[in-house]
Image: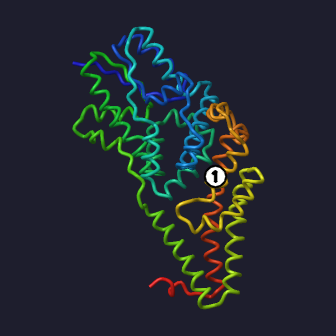
Amino acid sequence: MVDIHIIGTAHVSRESVEQVCKIIEEVKPDAVAVELCQKRFNALIKGIQEFSITDALKGNVLLSLLQIVLAYYQRKIGREMGVKPGEEMITAINKAKEIGADVLLIDRDIGITFQRLWQKISIFEKLRLLWNLLFFEKDDVKNILESVDSLIDEFRRIAPKASEVLIDERDAFMAYNIIKASERYDKIVVVVGAGHKEGIERYLKYPEKIPPIKDLLEVKKSKLSFSKIFGCFVTLLVVLTFAYILTKLGSEIAFKAFIYWFLINGILSALGASIALAHPLSILTAFLCAWLTSINPLIAAGWVSGYVELKMRKPNAEDLVKIFEAESFKDLFKNKAFRVLLVTALTNVGSMIGTFYGAYIILKMTGIDVKVLIP
């Protein structure tokens, strides 16, 4: 029978580091399984960050910012607790090498996890997550470490879909890998976050409940989501409104409506870029292109201003490394790579507000009843 020891750790706790060291020395396992994927292993052990600004701009900028901010908060908590984030994993890996045990990376690829997270959670859940992240109290750190169960329960309440992706799915994935490893090893020490321990033990006890692994690795191809359909609807509404004004109310009012549309979208998009302290050319670009991108569901104002910011700031490889080493929000804000992402995101937020407010103002200005446009 395979002897499996599961250690539930706090990723920023000195006690956890000491516990990992002690148990591995006592058990002397054949293999040490850690809650890491290859990318996280490379970042933690080799200092290699697989991150591309260009890819982030092409993909989901807000998702990239979320990963960066989450990593920042983990470092922040670690400093307060006097421990480097992931130190217990480093200790487990070093101890495994010391006793001649194999190191097993059992977690799902972090890129897949974050992509599945973004696809599954609703816009409201994203906002709740962001709100709770921004107003996280540093005084809560010790309470979190002392009461993992209550933290998990609170997380499930705030973001049920997010907890499903970040906790439940990974519990199943890691349990599957532990079961596969048990076919080759007689004694295994597993080092995972405390929030995963109970779930993994449950799946090890009832392995038939583990979902098909291919389902846990699936990232759905881009398709028409509700947000895209709604965006197309808004675009159609704006275009039809302008067509109605031009044909029914004349070119003078149509020109006036266009000026309103241009200024509202431009000012709010430029305001978003300005809040991010964008380069003047990026701000100007946001102002000039927002009116058009707001009625084009295939391109966003932030992509354009972000591209200009990228060309102006010219972040280098060192900036990409330092973005994951920032000690404060001030350091993050001064980082050229982070600034590009922030300009992109805040320009998009300003453009989104401008689209809805601009449509409202035009309809109100012309006196058009929305029922006329919607059968």
Q: Quadrant of the C terminus?
A: bottom left
* 375 sits to left or right of 310: left
Instruction: Measuring from the top left, give residue 159's x and y in whole percent.
Output: 46, 51
Which residue does the image show at 42% across and 46% down from the upper left? Answer: 116
Vertical arrangement, residue 323 with respect to residue 4, above or below = below
Q: Quadrant of the N terminus?
A: top left
Circle 1: residue type: Thr
Which residue does the image show at 27% across and 22% down from the upper left? Answer: 182
Instruction: Measuring from the top left, give residue 18's x and y in whole percent.
Output: 50, 17
Q: Nearer the viewer, residue 143 or 336?
A: 336
Instruction: Measuring from the top left, give residue 224's x and y in whole percent.
Output: 42, 61
Residue tagged 1 = 344
* 49 sits to left or right of 111: right
Instruction: Measuring from the top left, give residue 103's x and y in whole percent.
Output: 40, 19
Which residue does the image show at 53% across and 72% down from the upper left? Answer: 234
* 174 sits to left or right of 249: left
Vertical arrangement, residue 169 with respect to residue 317, above or below = below
* 171 sits to left or right of 193: left
